[in-house]
Each structure stands twice: as structure tokens, then as C-alpha cells.
Image (tube, rainbow, N blue to C red):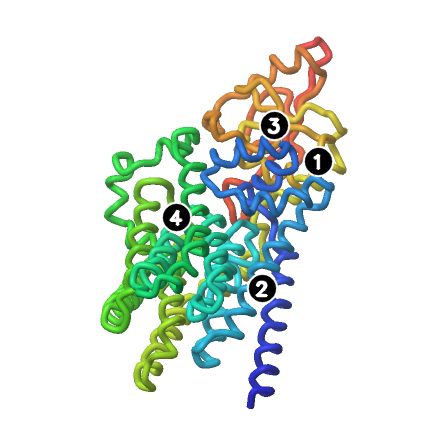
Amino acid sequence: MENKKTIINLVCIFLYAAATLSMIFFHEIWADEAQAWLVVRDLNFWGVISHVRTEGHPLLWYLILMPFAKTNCSVFVMQILNWLFATIAAGVFLWKSPFNKITNIIILLSSAFLYWYPVVARSYGLMILFLVLCAALYGKQKENPYLYTISIALLAQTHVIAFGVSAALAGVFFYKNIFCEKDKNTRNKYIFPFLITIFSLIFLVLYLNGSQNENFIVKGYNIKNNAVLLKGLYFDIVENIYGYKNWFYSIAAGLFWIFNAVFLFIKRKSLFFIYVLNFVYVLSVFVFIWGMMPQRTFLLLLVPLFCLFVLYKDLNTTNKIVVNTVLALTFLFTLPNSFEIIKKDIQHPYSDSKNIARYIQNNIPQNAVIVTNSPISTASILSYLPEDRWKIFYIPYNGYFTYYDWKKPVKSPYYPIAVDEILKQVPEVYILTAVYLSYKNIVPLYESDLKTIMHSEIFRIYKFERTKNGK
């Protein structure tokens, strides 16, 4: 029986790995993915540490990428690394999950596991890996306290959105193993493991403290500016998880969250604490700090999944049937969006960055003057271009750039480009923009597929030349 289970798990994880790996070849990275790669490629170690705090992120993902970016690897390596972390997470989940096979398979087919974490290359692949490891080690924390607390500490360093659940796990560890422990020798055994989590959390707070005031976009995102949007907060959360904003999904999600709150409160208060603290923290981030996207919003499903994962072994048969049914249905409802977004990514460019980079390499001379009015979006293009061979100029900063510096505000992409001033210095200028232009002496060279998924990364290239009379 055990051999049969092993074979089924191996087949499932092989199919999962093959399916998600194949999707990477169809996925073009966009600016948010490219930014991390460009930062570690183009800054030295101390420069990375200084800059990343303005991104509002922990350092772990950047430090992992740095050796590969510094040795001139292709940006595709970043996609492979992220895929690897997410695939290991799926494997650990499948191997250690207490749920039945059907529930496990449905969870792995959800848009979180099948697309958002393995395919979109950001630090969320690391986040789901350490969350799954914490779930697998939770019941063994007394036997392996260091392994468990290191997993919590690393989870906190994956993304700021994971801080809430990391702090909750650290608090429960302290309460169970130190505060409630009567034996002094046993209690002392867990002090140093606990300090690992505390150091990680404190370091993150000190590192990111005040960083929201250094990022011009985040600085303008607050409850006063978004009070009207708060009315639609719940429906936006549902849309980020399920891909659709309607009453069916809204009711289904609400019933899932209510079920977990009541069930965990009755069965185990410590897990209820983890569930509630994560929920409140994630909502607070969305309201006060920064907006939502599926990878962040899915924590509102994955932390309840974590809690039920830990609780499952202590449930009776009836409760196990209920839990499997609730989880299977909740994650099953994400499948339509999962297959829809995969279909779109295969049929159309996610970003046109890769195609633009290929066009530039084949058609625009090295060291040519390329000007943009969309400096944030063009980071994705630069990640596909060889370092230092093509540079992009942004007029308001009077300089070239690769990664984007969040301390510097940008103008609207519709502002006029002072091409005439640049043409006084050079005979021709290439304009890389996301909008249509209608200047004199303009030659349109390239236009993205208008069905590109990220509308902010539909690009156009124009060429301006000095006329014969010098104008």
C-alpha cells in the first residue's frame, strides 16, 4: 500500500513539474519580475541592500538571484529558480499532506499552485515553499525546534506579506514551548530556536521601517486616498483569488472563511490565532500599504489550508470528510481561472518585453539613443538585453537607467518627449513608448500585439531623424 502511494505521488509530482515547466517557456517576464534581476545584476552588494528596502521587500530573493545575475546568466535562470522552489513546495505538500488524494490534486491544480507561484518569477515561490515546510514541521517542532524555527525565520524573509503568519507562528511557538512549559530545562531547550524567529522578524522591521516613505508610489497609497475603494475591497479579494467578481464566488469564499474561523476556534485556539492574525495583517497591508495581486491574496486561502493541515490528524472521520469537502470545493472553484490564465499566457504574450528585446538586438545599433516615457515598464525589456550594450534614456532624469529607482517619481507616459532637444546632439533617436505618437519626421518601426496580457507593456518603437536642413 505504501509503495502504491509513493508511485502515485511520484507520478503526480512529475506531471506537475512537467506542466509548470512547459508553461515557463510561454511566459514572458514583466517589469515586477525583471526589477529584481536588474537590481542584483547592476548594483554591488551594498547597493542592493540600500536599494531593496525602497522596494518594500526582504533581501532573501535578491541574495539568491545575485550570483546568477553577476555571472551573466540569462534571466531565464530566475524563472527556473522560482519554478524549482514552487515545485519543491508542491512535492513536500503532496508527500506530507494528510488530506485525501482528490483534495491534494485539486489544490495543486489551483491557480496558485499551477500558475501564480511556479510561473510568475517573484519571491512568492519561496514564500509557498517555506509555508509548506512550516506546515510539515509544525507537529515535529518539539523534536526539531531549530529546523522549524529556521523555516519560520526564512518565511518572514520571503515577502512582507508573509510577516503576519510568520509572527503568529513565532508567537504560538513561544506560548506552547516556553511560556506554558513548567520544566526549566525543557523550556531552555526552546529559547535559542525562538530567538532565531525573533531576530528574523526584528531585522525585517528595522530594515523596512520608513521605506514606504522612500517609494513615491507607496507613499501616495493610503486609506485617505482609497476610502471609496474600501467598499469594494472584499470583491477585489475574491476576484484576485478566483479571477471573477460575482456573487457566487463571493459567497463561496465568505463561507470558507467563516467555516475556518468557527471550526478552528472550536478545535484549537492556537490555530485560530494564526488564522485571524494573518487575515487581519493581510487586509491591513491591502488597505494601508499596498494593493493586492493573486500571489499575495492567496495567503487568505493558504494559511487556512495550513491550519487544517496541522489540525487534520486529530480529527475524527466525520470532521475529516467535512474538511476534505470544504477544501476540495474551495480550491476547485479556482480551476476555471487557472486554465483561463494559462490559456491566455500560451496564446498571447504576457508582456511584449521579450519580443521588443529581440527586435532591438536585430534592428537597432548598439549604443543608439533609445528614449522612453515609460521607465517602469521598460525594465522588463532591459532584462532580456545583454548588459551595457543597449541603454534607455529617460528625459526627466537626464540619464540612462536599467532598474527603476522608486525614490524618483515619474511623469505620465503621455507627456511630450523633447525629441528636438535630443536631435541637436545626435542625428537620430529611437523612442520606446506604450502610447501612440504623432510627431513630424516619425518612422513607426514596431508595435506590440494588442492582445498582450499586461496592457502596460504593450510597446511601440518609433525612429526620429534630423531632416536634411538640420531641423
**Contact check, label 3 and label 2, Cβ < 8 Å:** no
Mark 3 vs mark 1, CA separation in Å: 16 Å
Q: Amino acid at mark 2?
A: Thr
Between discs 4 and 2, the one toward the N terminus:
2
Q: Amino acid at mark 1?
A: Ile
**Snapshot quadrant of residue 186:** bottom left
Foreground tag (1 vs 2) = 2
Which numbered dot is residue 128? none
Q: Secondary structure at mark 4?
A: loop
Mark 3 vs mark 4, CA separation in Å: 27 Å
Packing grade of label 1 (10 A; few <14, some 14-19, many >=20) is some
Q: Which residue is mark 1?
A: 360
Q: Secondary structure at mark 1?
A: helix
Foreground tag (3 vs 1) = 3
Q: Which residue is mark 2?
A: 87
* Closer to the camera in the image, 74 or 332: 74
Percent position of residue 423, x then y: 66, 15
149 shown above or below 227: below
